[in-house]
Amino acid sequence: MRKNLVKKLFREGKPIINGWLQIPSSFSAEVMAKQGWDSLTIDMQHGVIDYPNALQMLQAISSTETIPLARVNWNEPGQIMKILDAGCYGVICPMVSNRQQAENFVKACMYPPNGYRSYGPIRGLLYGGSDYPEKADDEILKLAMIETKEALENLDEILSTKGLDGVYIGPADLSLALNEKPGFDRPENTKAFKEILNILAKAKENKLMAGIHNGTPEYAQKMIDKGFNFVTIASDQRLMTSGAKSIIEKFKGHQKFKESKGY
């Protein structure tokens, strides 16, 4: 089976630089994949991407060494299994708030006896190889998002879930859970920043991957220096926006619209 580069980099102690896809286009996915990201995540939660879009984007990413991941829109087994069958090599699951939810997520990613994933990797076999069914449980990356107040209260139980590879922090929802304004690149004097460091420390105690979404490369580097293994910087939509704004500013000297604070 094709090896999961993300897991390999983690075992070697090297940071994973992850890109984020929100635009439903196989061409833009291919362009992004050609730039050298370690992995690219197809955002099916807050992006404007449906399953047929995601399938074509996975095919485009497969023309490169970049590892294809997806964030599903909910902890729903059918959706998780279907995107894995399409050849996705890892799932980021939002709003995992307790041990039971974490276990349900992990089991949906794994075949019996380790889980209850239904057999039928229609494109997983094409991308992963003929021995995909025997080795997929080990190669598929499983990251639970920690972004609710309940998740913070149940952090130790979530992190001890068998089969979980790591956690991924959504700073915006985490900030909302702590009664702060949503956003990325949280200042050090915020409650969210304190909890981010606590999640990181707990993940390291459990020898799990720790990932976080960032707004800028500078903040992502700061998070790597703090000990995060997996960092996402902006998204295709935001990169396109900032690039276009930079050009317009050079000619017109102002921004007509404010920069988006979303993914």
Image (tube, rainbow, N blue to C red):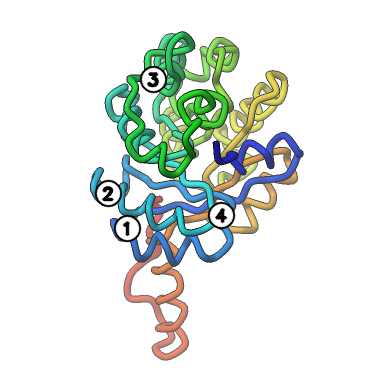
Furthest residue toward front: 130
Q: CA distance from mark 1 to mark 4?
A: 20 Å
Assess whether mark 2 and mark 4 are in contact (beta carbons under 8 angstroms): no
- Which callout, 4 or 2, points to the residue nearer the camera? 4
Quadrant of residue 100 within the rendered picture: top left
Residue depicted at 38% across the width and 76% down the height:
255
Amino acid identity at mark 2: Ile
Amino acid identity at mark 3: Ala
Q: Earlier in the sequence, mark 4 or mark 2?
A: 2
Residue depicted at 55% across the width and 29% down the height:
167
- Which callout, 3 or 4, points to the residue nearer the camera? 4
Assess whether mark 2 and mark 1 are in contact (beta carbons under 8 angstroms): yes
Determine which residue is flagged by label 4: 65
Helix, strand or loop under label 1: loop
Q: Residues within 10 Å of mark 4 (few under 14, many from 20)?
A: some
Determine which residue is flagged by label 3: 108
